[in-house]
């Protein structure tokens, strides 16, 4: 059994970046095309464009497409494709991206009509060339919703972004310059028997024919130990996705005893060892964070910090 | 009532002459069709929705019940009869049915003290078919590790089940269709005329059907169908919300102990599906109207307050909440009755919970009522089985295919097969395959599913709807 082999689930940005660091790894992709959602993302974050980074990283990579990972065990991962199922032994890293938060989590009540799209479904349909509606409400302001809004801005009569938290990497002006209406608040109610007709926020009513849910949560679908990219922590910047994968790769290469990082601040990787203690913090600029007992104030979104020796705890100060 | 919707002679009319017309393709209508399809009969089922099981049945929580109070009621007796019949039906149709038990859990000392009396009462009424046991703390810790530490004791009632409820609906439909039953979907019955030797039915698509017998299995709309035959019933509309979780939380069904059970409250339970998802509910409230399938904040709060304290912390993530509406007749019991105008018409009224469990017994009763009114039941020489619908998730190591839905592990071939079996909508494919029902809420698979549906139907993606009518998904 080859204990050292790295098996990466998901050939999006995080998975491709990892594969770059582990040339002998196996890269599994469930879709027909590798590249994940960043392959269609043309919205720059401080000059970096996701689709361009995907194209560069894809060069020379071997990806097992149309192959789904469906179960983990202590030795590796079970995958299935048109030829059958098989077990791949090795160290499994899940780079399968985020999920959308559910209506129950978000506190959205009312009817369940047609025209409500989880972001990823909307993203796919728009990239296939379809229109989702004339007056579109996007719930959540972040890199992904802005990138989708920029695609929709030429196609829809009206785009609203309802948000309760601001993006860590994009200013509100960037949405305004696309002609998007920004509404601060939370969506509470959906109206419409057949097609969605109205959403109510805590302060406004918006007539609409499509609602896109762009509030995200990390998604460890198979219960893996090692997580990369949005599967482990929501990251709004393609460059930072790559950087977080680099940190995980360095950690795994350096080795040592892995200790899980605790605390209420999202971090990547999820572990430190006695030999490698760098992690990326999933917070924006100017946040007071206690890192292993030391208080720091972040100077940029997704800052990388070194956790001092001792218990690896990262908490909001 | 329209008086002259048929003319003196209409050749079309005679072509459409049936032994039995069944109005409604929910669980009771389908179960009746299934029973009748074993006999040499010409039958047709008329359903207003685009697919079977989209009315009251859709809100069903997939539990095969045992205890329904009061024990003297028709629904209580028929649920226990139906429970016993369900196993053979599921086996014949290849539908998953997992047997389980229910724990009625006491977390307060005065509830604990009452458990022996409740157990005795249950034993006296349930008899040997459904054993009842008293359970102590140690048993609960060992058998149900996710149950709260505050659980002091419980009554365990055996004989419950969890059924793949949509698969049963579709299996009954497929079996009946394979054995000659005709189905009309997307047509609402708007008039019924009772002649001397035939019954005439008109649909909103101007179709005329005639038959010797008529079964009203209209579910939530059975009151209006009864009105068309000159009979009267008024339903109270009860709304129940069910909360769906991404994982199964318990091995058994869990229900809190009450000292004074209210027959009108469904009580609800912590449940699970054969797919391994957790369910909480339902609650019971008054619906504003038959289309009031809204979920409100107070529904979620009621369910969370009731069931949350029964479990430990790790509850899983709630995927969604949905509402179902139950037709409750004044006597709060099933009413299975001949029409006051003709004994060739049978009404199935008040098909609220536990009608799903009781449906085999209801169908048997309906068939026997039709027989005593003169319907000739000649068993078919050969009955065709339901075509098995293999699912990759049941045996992934032995299967192959491209996975479209990761959460529920559904292949492209399963999506195509669902369309070939008659699902033309996204919702139909989701119900039939389980695709898009997981924690990603269809985020990962919705685009691919509608593309496959369109390809299989030979139409454009923008023609595919969520559930028919004006429920369009995308435009070009």
Image: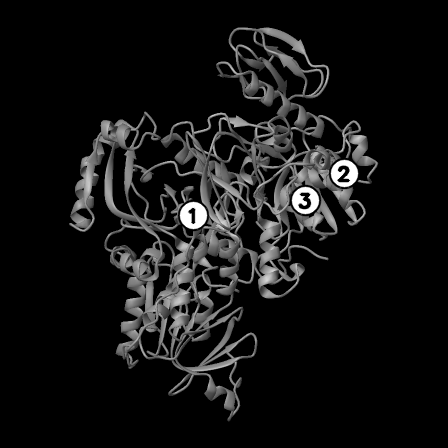
Q: Is residue A106 above or below residue A136?
A: above
Question: Residue at 35% across / 36% down in the picture?
Answer: B250
Q: Is residue A75 left or right of residue A141?
A: left
* Label 3 element class: helix
Q: Quadrant of residue A34?
A: top right
Count numbered badges in the picture: 3
Q: Chain of mark 3?
A: A
How busy is the neighbourhood of tag 1: few (under 14 within 10 Å), some, or many (20 plus)?
Answer: some
Residue toward you, A43 or B107: A43
Of B126 and B449, the residue lying toward us? B449
Q: Is residue B315 above or below residue A306?
A: below
Against B223, residue A94 (above or below) is above
Label 1, on which residue?
B393
Name the chain letter of the residue that bears numbered label 2: A
> Does residue B323 show up?
yes
**Which residue has dot 3 on it?**
A123
Neighbour tally class for label 3: few under 14, some 14-19, many 20 plus, Cα within 10 Å: many
Image location (x, y in percent) of residue B252: 31, 40
Residue lying at the far bottom of the rendered structure = B9
Front position in the image: B308 or B68 = B308
- On screen, residue A238 versus residue A188, left or right, reads right
- Asked if the residue under mark 1 is in contact with the one under mark 3, i.e. CB atoms within 8 Å, the reply is no
In the figure, A270 relative to A69: above or below? above
> Label 2: which residue?
A42
Whole-Å distance between the Cαs marked 2 and 3? 12 Å
Sequence-wise, the earlier of marks 2 and 3 is 2
Q: Give how far across and how far down residue B414 sits, in percent.
A: 49, 56
């Amino acid at each position: 059994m080859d204990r050292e082999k790295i098996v990466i689930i998901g050939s999006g940005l995080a998975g491709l970046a990892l594969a770059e660091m582990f040339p002998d790894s196996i890269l599994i992709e469930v879709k027909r095309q590798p590249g994940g959602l960043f392959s269609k993302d043309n919205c720059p974050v401080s000059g970096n464009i996701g689709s361009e980074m995907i194209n560069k990283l894809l060069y020379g990579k071997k990806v097992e497409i149309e192959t789904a990972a469906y179960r983990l065990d202590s030795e590796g991962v079970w995958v299935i494709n048109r030829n059958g199922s098989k077990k791949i032994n090795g160290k499994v890293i899940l780079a399968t991206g985020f999920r959308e938060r559910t209506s129950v989590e978000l506190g959205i009540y009312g009817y369940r009509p047609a025209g409500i799209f989880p972001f990823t479904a909307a993203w796919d349909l728009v990239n296939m060339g379809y229109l989702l509606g004339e007056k579109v409400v996007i719930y959540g302001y972040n890199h992904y919703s802005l990138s989708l809004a920029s695609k929709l801005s030429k196609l829809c009569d009206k785009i609203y972004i309802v948000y309760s938290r601001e993006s860590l990497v994009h200013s509100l002006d960037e949405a305004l310059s696309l002609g998007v209406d920004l509404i601060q608040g939370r969506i509470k109610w959906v109206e419409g028997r057949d097609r969605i007709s109205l959403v109510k926020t805590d302060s406004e009513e918006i007539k609409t024919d499509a609602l896109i849910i762009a509030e995200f949560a990390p998604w460890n679908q198979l219960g893996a130990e090692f997580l990369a990219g949005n599967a482990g922590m929501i990251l709004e910047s393609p460059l930072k996705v790559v950087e977080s994968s680099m940190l995980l790769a360095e950690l795994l290469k350096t080795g040592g005893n892995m200790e899980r990082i605790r605390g209420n601040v999202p971090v990547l990787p999820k572990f430190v060892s006695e030999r490698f203690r760098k992690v990326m913090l999933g917070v924006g600029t100017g946040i007071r964070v206690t890192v292993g007992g030391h208080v720091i104030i972040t100077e940029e979104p997704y800052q990388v910090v070194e956790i001092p020796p001792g218990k690896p705890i990262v908490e909001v100060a | 009532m329209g008086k002259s919707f048929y003319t003196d002679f209409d050749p079309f009319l005679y072509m459409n002459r049936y032994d039995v017309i069944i109005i409604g393709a929910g669980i009771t209508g389908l179960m009746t069709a299934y029973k009748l399809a074993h006999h040499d009969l010409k039958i047709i089922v008329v359903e207003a929705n685009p697919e079977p099981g989209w009315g009251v049945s859709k809100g069903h929580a997939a539990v095969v019940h045992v205890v329904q109070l009061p024990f003297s009621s028709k629904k209580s007796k028929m649920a226990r009869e139906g429970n016993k019949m369900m196993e053979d039906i599921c086996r014949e149709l290849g539908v998953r049915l997992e047997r389980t038990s229910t724990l009625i859990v006491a977390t307060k000392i005065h509830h604990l003290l009452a458990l022996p009396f409740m157990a005795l009462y249950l034993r006296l009424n349930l008899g040997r078919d459904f054993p009842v046991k008293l359970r102590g703390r140690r048993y609960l810790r060992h058998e149900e590790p996710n149950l709260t530490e505050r659980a002091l004791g419980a009554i365990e009632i055996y004989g419950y089940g969890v059924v793949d409820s949509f698969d049963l609906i579709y299996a009954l439909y497929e079996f009946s269709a394979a054995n000659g039953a005709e189905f009309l979907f997307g047509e609402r019955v708007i008039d019924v005329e009772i002649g001397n030797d035939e019954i005439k039915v008109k649909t909103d698509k101007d179709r005329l059907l005639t038959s010797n017998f008529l079964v009203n299995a209209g579910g939530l709309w059975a009151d209006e169908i009864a009105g068309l035959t000159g009979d009267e019933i008024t339903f109270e509309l009860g709304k129940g919300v069910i909360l769906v979780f991404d994982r199964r939380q318990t091995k058994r069904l869990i229900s809190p102990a009450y000292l004074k059970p209210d027959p009108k409250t469904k009580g609800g339970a912590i449940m699970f599906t054969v797919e391994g998802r957790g369910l909480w509910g339902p609650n019971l409230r008054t619906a504003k109207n038959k289309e009031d399938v809204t979920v409100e904040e107070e529904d979620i709060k009621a369910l969370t307050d009731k069931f949350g304290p029964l479990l430990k912390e790790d509850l899983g993530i709630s995927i969604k909440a949905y509402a179902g509406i139950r037709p409750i007749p004044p006597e709060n019991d099933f009413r299975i009755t001949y029409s006051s105008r003709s004994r060739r018409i049978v009404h199935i009224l008040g098909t609220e919970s536990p009608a799903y469990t009781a449906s085999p017994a209801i169908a048997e009763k309906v068939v026997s009522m039709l027989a005593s009114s003169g319907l000739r039941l000649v068993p078919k020489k050969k009955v065709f089985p339901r075509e098995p619908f293999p699912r990759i998730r049941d045996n992934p190591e032995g299967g192959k295919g491209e996975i479209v839905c990761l959460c529920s592990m559904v292949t492209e071939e399963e999506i195509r097969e669902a369309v070939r079996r008659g699902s033309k909508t996204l919702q139909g494919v989701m119900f039939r395959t389980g695709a898009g029902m997981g924690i990603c809420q269809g985020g990962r698979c919705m685009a691919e599913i509608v593309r496959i549906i369109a390809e299989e139907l030979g139409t454009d993606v923008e023609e595919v709807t969520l559930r028919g009518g004006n429920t369009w998904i995308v435009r070009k």
